[in-house]
Amino acid sequence: MNWIDNSLNIHAAALMKRSERAEIIASNVANSDTPGFKARDMDFKAEISSLMQGSGGRLLTSHAKHMKMDATQSSNLLYRVPTQPSENGNTVEGEAEQAAFTENAIRYQASIQFLSSKVKGLKLALRGE
């Protein structure tokens, strides 16, 4: 890995994980009326920590015919614990999901801004300014 990759990797990984989390939350919202559906989420800090340590949440295979997990999928999805469980077993809480989605979107935008400022700084460094 070169120095440019080292300076941009964490921000690119954060964008990827934020995007993945947005899909998970959107799936929760889409299934808010599905009986028995269990709301899921990811521990963003743990996901980023595993990426920084190099494990990346990848599953190891012991045989050539084992299927590989998609690199964009999280292997550490957690179930949300509802504050008010519904009678049909669905654990999606609309307000909580909306709040989580909004927070994730704001943090996604912040990651884009961090990445953009890093790229601008690298451009200035390469130009010698």
Image (spheres, grey):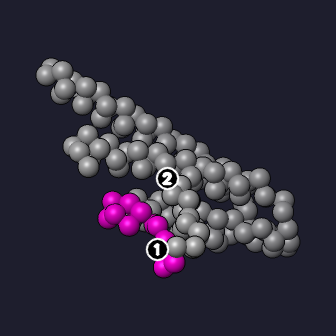
- Local packing at callout 1 (Cα closer than 10 Å; few below 14, some 14-19, many 20+) is few
The amino acid at mark 1 is Leu
- The residue that disc 1 covers is 60
Instruction: Report whether 38 appears left or right of 10.
Output: right
Front residue of 52/108: it is 52
Name the magenta segment's main secondary structure: loop
The amino acid at mark 2 is Lys
Residue at left 49%, top 75%?
61
Instruction: Report whether 56 appears left or right of 65.
Output: left
- Judged from the image, the secondary structure of the residue bearing numbered disc 2 is helix
Name the disc covering residue 117, or none.
none
Name the disc covering residue 17, or none.
2
**Does the segment drawn in magenta span residue 61?**
yes
Q: Is residue 95 among what the camera can see? A: no
Residue at left 46%, top 66%?
57
**Does the segment drawn in magenta span residue 77?**
no
Q: Mark 2 and mark 1: span between their CA atoms?
A: 20 Å
- Where residue 31 appears, as percent x and y from the top left, is 78, 58
- Which of pointers 2 and 1 indicates the residue nearer the eye? 1
- Compared with 32, 19 (above or below) is above
State which tag comes first along the sequence, 2 or 1: 2
Q: What stretch is highlighted in magenta?
A: 51-63
Q: Residue furthest front?
A: 64
Residue at left 57%, top 54%?
21
